Amino acid sequence: MLHFKNKIKFVLVPFITFLLAFISILFMIMFEFRTVADFQELPYHRIFVGFLETLVLVYIYNFFVRKFNGFMPWKKNWFIRFVLDLLLVLSFTTIVISGAQLAIKFGLIPHEIPHEGKREFMYIMPLFVSSLFLVIVEMIIAMEERNNMEMKLAILEKEQLNTKYSVLKEQLDHHFLFNNLSVLSSLIYESTEKADKFIQDFAAIYRYVLSINKQDLVTVSEELDFISTYLNLYKFRFEEGLSYKLNNIDYKSKFRLPPLTLQVLVENAIKHNVMSRNEPLNIEISMLNNTLIIQNNLQIKSDVASTSTGQSNLIEKYLLLESTPPEFKIENNTYIARIPLIQPKDD
């Protein structure tokens, strides 16, 4: 289909040529260089033949220019390429002039060149027209090759982004698994009852992780149901040292977000802050204007250095999805993350 469309471009060249000729005729009539009667004498069959000649010439140039682009493109050696194009124009000009002379000699077309000035015009005009057509063909092919290159680059870039995004998501899944296995290990020695409940919730959570393995986006309700269960697991371990609440959540919202986004933020809050009964970590998740706002009080651990890897991963995920990236800031001793929700493309 694309190849057919490219062919159509060259059919337009004769139309453009005759349009320019028609405009020239209108100017000559407008400024009284010629009259309408002068042009009414032009034979219509000659116009049709001229159209076919133009079409054939353009397609021949198209063939040779593509061949030249194959073994001697302009970027390889512009001077040799220029010589090749020049020889091509001179060759076809010679063929056209020689053919016209033979046609006149054998009486196939009338000899209507009584003055020397017009005889010179007979030699100059084919050279000018051939050069013009070559330039037009070169431009069309150059634009076609540029468009094809841009399309290939866009497809390649999309494939690279998809691959990179999949790698990021797989790394996050593994991170999630290892961290929670560590939590489970500590709970087994603390309380078998807690460990059993933890295992059930952990199984539910990991089913979610497996279910969204091939998804780039999930609904707000899916992600919030997941993060509630996830935080409940940590409540088993830290009890009154951790509290969380969800405010103003529209669970019926059609907007989406990348899976495990909230898990990254919650995990960072738990990892980098002190938690105790006297100094609990308070996590709050709210929804405002199609944005999820996750905030927690800061009680920074002195022995845990922040690498901002979680933030970087989230920003990169949003950029790969071609969406507005999240914002992170610290205000009044509170860490605040603003996660833009993404409208699904089918809405």
Image: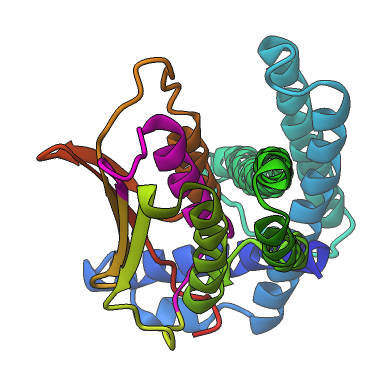
Residue 100 locus on image (x, y percent): 78, 51
- 158, above or below 18, in the image: above
Q: Residue at x 74, y 30 (%)?
A: 90
Say which of 274 and 254 sits in front: 274
Q: Which residues are magenta?
A: 255-281
Q: Is residue 130 visible?
A: no
Instruction: Using the rendered view, name the quadrant where residue 274 is placed.
Output: top left
Query: Is residue 165 placed above or below 38 in the rendered structure?
Result: above
**Residue 92 or 261: which is nearer the viewer?**
261
**Viewer-closest of 194 and 223:** 194
Residue 175 located within the stretch drawn in magenta:
no
Q: Residue furthest bottom?
A: 252
Q: Position of residue 87 (x, y in %)?
A: 77, 24
Task: Say which of 235 and 308 sits in front.
Answer: 235
Residue that extends furthest to the left in the rendered view of this protein: 332
Q: Position of residue 153 (x, y in %)?
A: 67, 41
Question: Seen in the image, is 6 located left or right of residue 314?
Answer: right
Q: Is residue 257 above or below residue 337?
A: below
Verify whether residue 266 appears in magenta: yes
Q: Is residue 16 above or below residue 175?
A: below
